[in-house]
Image (cartoon, helix red, strand yellow):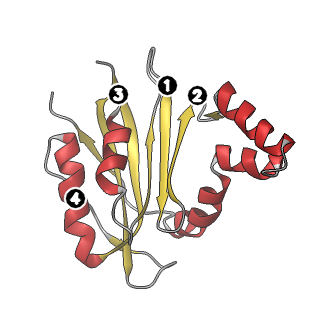
């Protein structure tokens, strides 16, 4: 299995869930995780942290799955592409749920042809606006909701963890 790197960005979490996030991430990575939690100025009473990791390809999906059920949490997980494996990006907000996209070597979101065709069909039948559908395919609603929390995290410490194999 190919080894890759990625980052877990926890944008907002109440203090009571901090140890649970560490436990879930540690369970996926196979090593104990202790994050440096800092107050999230964009959402009073919540905390933020970042975790850079190195593990087998597909770890971003496992991290997103382990965290997505907690409604008081906002997070993103990215995974770099490797030889023969596309990169990934997951975003989660309590109001929008989970977003997943495949990313290329430069971090661009790559939209599969069939998803574009489905968006065009919805627009042609009047079921949806094409611009809005393409923006959803690119994750714009998630980016719009998460941007204030990303900005508030500038300068936060990052810790690297490597999966035990």
Secondary structure, mark 3, is loop
* Mark 2 and mark 3: Cα distance apart in space: 14 Å
Which residue does the image show at 74% across and 40% down from the upper left? 119
Classify mark 1: helix, strand or loop: loop
Marks 2 and 1: in contact by CB < 8 Å? yes
Query: Which is more N-terminal, label 1 or label 3?
Result: 3
In the image, residue 92 lies at what x, y percent?
Answer: 47, 57
Q: Is residue 34 visible?
A: no
Label 2 SS: loop
Dot 1 corresponds to which residue? 86
Identify the disc placed on residue 57. Answer: 3
Look at 48% across and 36% down and name the residue there. 88
Residue 22 is labelled as: 4
- C-alpha span from label 4 to label 2: 28 Å
Going from N to C along the chain, the mark reached first, 4 or 1, is 4
Comes first in the chain, label 2 or label 3: 3
Q: Which residue is mark 2?
A: 104
Instruction: Identify the secondary structure beneath mark 4.
Output: helix
Is 45 above or below relative to 121? Answer: below
Residue sitting nearer the eye, 15 or 126: 126
Q: Where on the picture, by quarter, is residue 58?
A: top left
Res 159 label: none
Q: Earlier in the sequence, mark 4 or mark 2?
A: 4
């Amino acid at each position: 299995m190919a080894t890759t790197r990625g980052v877990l960005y926890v944008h907002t979490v109440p203090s009571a869930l901090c140890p649970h996030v560490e436990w879930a991430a540690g369970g996926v990575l196979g090593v104990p995780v202790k994050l440096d939690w800092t107050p999230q100025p964009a959402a009073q009473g919540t905390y933020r942290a970042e975790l850079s990791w190195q593990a087998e390809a597909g770890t971003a999906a496992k991290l997103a799955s382990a965290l997505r059920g907690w409604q008081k949490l906002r997070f993103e997980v990215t995974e770099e592409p490797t030889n023969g494996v596309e990169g990934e990006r997951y975003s989660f907000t309590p109001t929008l749920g989970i977003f997943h996209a495949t990313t290329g070597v430069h971090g661009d979101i790559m939209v599969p042809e069939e998803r574009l065709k489905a968006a065009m069909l919805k627009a042609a039948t009047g079921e949806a606006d094409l611009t809005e559908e393409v923006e959803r395919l690119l994750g714009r609603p998630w980016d719009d909701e998460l941007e204030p929390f990303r900005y508030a995290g500038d300068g936060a410490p990052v810790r690297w963890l490597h999966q035990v194999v």
